[in-house]
């Protein structure tokens, strides 16, 4: 039996609980979630337990020492407690925003790609129960990362400091449900206000902003504040007095719930018990109508320019035109690619470090590696869309052209838009500092090209709708290789732009070696 | 014969466009009713409303005298719906899929296992029961979905293009299974673009266009309606929906 066939064989597992019941349906959701990845489930469990075990052991030794020194909650006395609670509040806001962004995408996906919901909703189980379970599954999927990261420390704090820390675990669990409830309300409202056409794109942007907002704010303050080392105890005390945050202010309510203020914790749980079912209720009431509207979306879509374009530019022209048309006519994909820019903002913050007078100063050299990294990321995305997510591989395979020619055209389609986008910043940089400009031009071209080449060499067949999950479709080694090449070139350009060209040789050699390792010759003709 | 399905004045609009416009028809137990129409005529929308996947704007749907719009759960217990695209869970095995569908319809576990074994053997999927559905060919997927539709022994079976993607042997097998269900007393509604299949299998045929039922009846009744006695269903159908019947006509 071949390796693939062996992998396809799975021991059929029956679900526990009464068929059609909540537990049974939830088991089904979680089984699908568990099998989603490429990893063997048993290996996954072992790896997960190993990581959790290591983290629990490490945090045990840390909190065995720290726990008794931490004052037991609740924290309700004085401005120092206020500042501590404010920090916890920000942490909760961060977790909540990331959970909500994931839930928004999941809710939108449920409307647009109904998949199994047709089967589930045609069964004699109430739509309400099905959607409650689906929404709960969305909430549960958002939880493991934070429960895994904060769970063991909170558990040891419960043992070594105060049992009231258990409230933190309760808040993490309920936070996932509250964020999902809000996400469902937001998606329903977007659908009502904007209709199906814009909701998908806007929800995508909204979720990215929701997920990134707190992270970016952190990064902004982290990078732009003066890095003058730790404050003295006296300076800290002065800051606390100056901020004068009272622990009983309303906006510290989530933090009070997290840190074991029993009344606040109960109120938090109560609020979740209202928000989550309310979100599911509103979402399920509108679900069938919204899904129907989404399914008819684009049914009457016409392309504005109906003239028959002249066949020009040969193979490259045809491929580039086709790829550009498909991309421009897919605003969702376009927005997903564009949103990558959002996560590069922290790099921009680096350039805005305040000088000792409190004025922002620009560091020209820092632009070169930033642009290099950005060019690689964008080109990598575009090559994935054009090569791996090719809608008609059979058509390409059946065409009387060499596959290398098709790939060359696709590399052109992926790299040229990136280079065009980078022309202005690189010229501006060159005008400010010609050496840095040259390093930036080299970095942008090299990283865009190498990302495109690796995308072609290590292509995997996928669908455009899997863009967000594209990294899961390839092997782990390829993903790591891509990351190393991008970072290697960025380091090369960084070292060069900061005036250490000899140092730049080290990452450059590593990058070339990585490119060599990932090289895979293209067959003369496509095989599907 | 019992009335299995009665649809009256069914209507559905999408953004001002009438997708289904006052359709009404009846299907009896032990009858195979073919619902035909050109692309976008409203066939799938009609079936989705009957299956409870879409809310109708107006009209009545009665499944074995159960008001499907007021009591969809009771109606759904009697119905199986096979969509035109076989939607399976890629990561479930064929066995797990059938077990899951049986659970959704509340089939007793032991009974579900017996039926799953029988259906998988009948459809030639028994050796693949522990394979994940992602490894299946289109035909195998179609057969697995059909097994899912039959596992709760529905009294009303709605099949949207059930023969798409099947090879000759599988197509014959599926047709035989459908016929067997009809003979056992189930009502079957079938949509297909393969008019020879409808001609050979259907007891009655309904033709819809632009969301309206143009005509319905046995083949001889349709021939009479179209003034095309002795002609094939394809000719009758094209004449009723006023489509060109030859390349020369299309060119004109």
Image (tube, coloured by chain):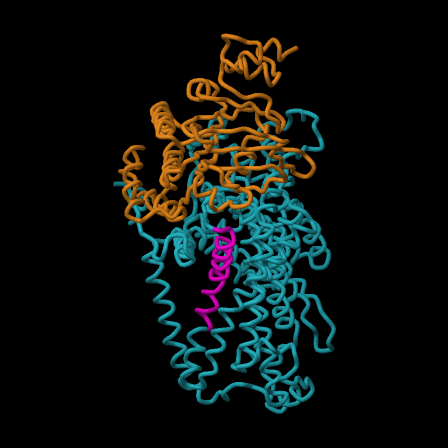
Q: Position of residue A276 (x, y in %)?
A: 55, 63
Q: Position of residue A317 (x, y in %)?
A: 62, 31
Q: Colour of chain B?
A: orange
The N terminus of chain A lies in quadrant:
top left
Q: Is residue A232 magenta?
A: no
- Camera-nearest residue between B145 and A113: B145
Left or right: A383 in relation to B166: right
Left or right: A263 in relation to A42: right
* Outermost residue, left side: A1
Which of the 4 image quarters holds residue B97?
Answer: top left
Magenta: main secondary structure equals: helix
> Can see residue A203?
yes
Left or right: A431 in relation to B165: right
- Camera-nearest residue between A73 and A466: A73
Residue drawn at (39%, 72%) of the image? A55
* Outermost residue, bottom side: A234
User: Which region of the structure is painted magenta?
Assistant: A126-150
> Can see residue A37?
no
The C terminus of chain A lies in quadrant:
top left
Which of the 4 image quarters holds residue A3?
Answer: top left
Q: Is residue A143 magenta?
A: yes
Chain (cyan): A
Residue drawn at (57%, 79%) of the image? A264
Which of the 4 image quarters holds residue A98?
Answer: bottom right
- Camera-nearest residue between A228 and B25: B25
- Camera-nearest residue between A502 and A232: A232
Q: Position of residue A315 (x, y in %)?
A: 57, 29
């Amino acid at each position: 039996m071949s390796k693939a066939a062996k992998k396809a064989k799975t021991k059929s597992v029956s679900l526990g609980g009464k068929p059609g019941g909540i537990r049974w349906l939830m088991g089904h959701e979680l089984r699908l979630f568990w099998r989603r990845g490429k990893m063997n489930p048993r290996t996954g469990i072992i790896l997960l337990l190993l990581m959790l075990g290591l983290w629990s052991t490490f945090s045990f030794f840390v909190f065995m020492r720290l726990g008794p020194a931490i004052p037991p909650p609740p924290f309700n006395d004085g401005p120092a407690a206020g500042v501590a609670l404010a920090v916890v509040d920000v942490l909760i806001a961060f977790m909540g925003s990331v959970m909500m962004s994931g839930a928004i995408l999941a809710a939108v996906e449920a409307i647009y790609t109904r998949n199994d919901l047709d089967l589930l909703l045609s069964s004699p189980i109430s739509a309400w129960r099905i959607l409650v379970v689906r929404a709960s599954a969305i909430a549960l999927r958002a939880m493991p990362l934070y429960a895994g990261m904060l769970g063991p420390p909170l558990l040891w704090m419960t043992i070594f400091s105060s049992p009231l820390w258990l409230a933190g675990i309760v808040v993490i669990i309920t936070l996932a449900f509250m964020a999902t409830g809000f996400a469902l309300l937001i998606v329903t409202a977007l659908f009502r206000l904007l209709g199906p056409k814009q909701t998908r794109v806007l929800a995508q942007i909204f979720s990215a902003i929701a997920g990134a907002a707190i992270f970016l704010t952190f990064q902004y303050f982290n990078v732009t504040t003066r890095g003058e080392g730790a404050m003295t105890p006296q300076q800290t005390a002065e800051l606390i007095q100056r901020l004068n945050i009272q622990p009983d202010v309303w906006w510290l309510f989530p933090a009070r719930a997290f840190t074991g203020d029993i009344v606040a914790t109960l109120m938090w749980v109560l609020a979740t018990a209202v928000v989550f079912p309310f979100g599911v209720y509103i979402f399920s009431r509108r679900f069938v109508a919204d899904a129907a509207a989404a399914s008819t979306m684009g049914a009457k879509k016409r392309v504005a320019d109906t003239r028959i374009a002249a066949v020009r530019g040969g193979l490259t022209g045809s491929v580039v035109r086709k790829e550009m048309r498909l991309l421009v006519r897919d605003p969702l994909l376009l927005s997903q690619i564009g949103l990558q820019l959002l996560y590069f903002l922290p790099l921009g913050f680096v350039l805005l470090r305040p000088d000792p007078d409190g004025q922002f100063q620009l560091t020209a050299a820092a632009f070169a590696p930033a642009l290099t990294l950005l060019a690689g990321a964008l080109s990598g995305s575009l090559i994935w869309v054009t090569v791996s997510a090719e809608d008609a591989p059979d058509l390409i395979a059946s065409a009387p052209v060499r596959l290398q020619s098709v790939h060359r055209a696709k590399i052109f389609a992926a790299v040229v838009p990136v280079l065009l986008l980078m022309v202005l910043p690189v010229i501006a940089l060159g005008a400010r500092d010609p050496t840095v400009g040259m390093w930036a031009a080299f970095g942008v071209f090299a990283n865009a090209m190498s990302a495109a080449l690796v995308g072609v060499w290590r292509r995997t067949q996928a669908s455009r709708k899997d863009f967000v999950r594209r990294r899961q479709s390839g092997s782990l080694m390829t993903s790591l290789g891509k990351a190393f090449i991008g970072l290697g070139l960025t380091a090369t350009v960084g070292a060069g732009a900061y005036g250490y060209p000899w140092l730049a040789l080290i990452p450059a050699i590593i990058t070339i070696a990585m490119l060599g390792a990932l090289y895979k010759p293209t067959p003369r003709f496509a095989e599907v | 014969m019992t009335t299995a399905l009665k649809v009256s004045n069914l209507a559905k609009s999408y953004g001002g466009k009438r997708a289904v416009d006052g359709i009404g028809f009846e299907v009896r137990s032990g009858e195979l009713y073919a619902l035909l129409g050109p692309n976008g005529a409203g066939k799938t929308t009609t079936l989705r409303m009957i299956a409870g996947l879409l809310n109708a704007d107006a009209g009545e749907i009665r499944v074995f005298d159960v008001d499907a719009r007021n009591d969809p759960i009771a109606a759904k217990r009697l119905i199986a719906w096979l969509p035109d695209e076989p939607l399976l869970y890629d990561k479930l095995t064929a066995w797990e899929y059938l077990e899951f569908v049986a659970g959704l319809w509340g089939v007793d576990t032991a009974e579900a296992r017996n039926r799953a074994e029988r259906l998988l053997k009948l459809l030639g999927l028994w050796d693949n029961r522990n394979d994940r559905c992602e490894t299946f060919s289109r035909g195998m997927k179609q057969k697995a979905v059909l097994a899912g539709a039959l596992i709760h022994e529905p009294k009303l079976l709605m099949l949207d293009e059930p023969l798409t993607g099947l090879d000759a042997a599988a197509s014959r097998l599926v047709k035989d299974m459908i016929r067997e269900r009809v003979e056992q007393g189930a009502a079957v509604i079938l949509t297909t673009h393969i008019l020879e299949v409808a001609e050979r299998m259907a007891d009655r045929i309904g033709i819809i266009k632009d969301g309206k039922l143009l005509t319905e009846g046995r083949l001889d009744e349709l021939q009479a309606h179209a003034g095309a006695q002795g002609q094939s269903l394809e000719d009758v159908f094209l004449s009723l929906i006023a489509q060109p019947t030859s390349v020369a006509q299309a060119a004109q």
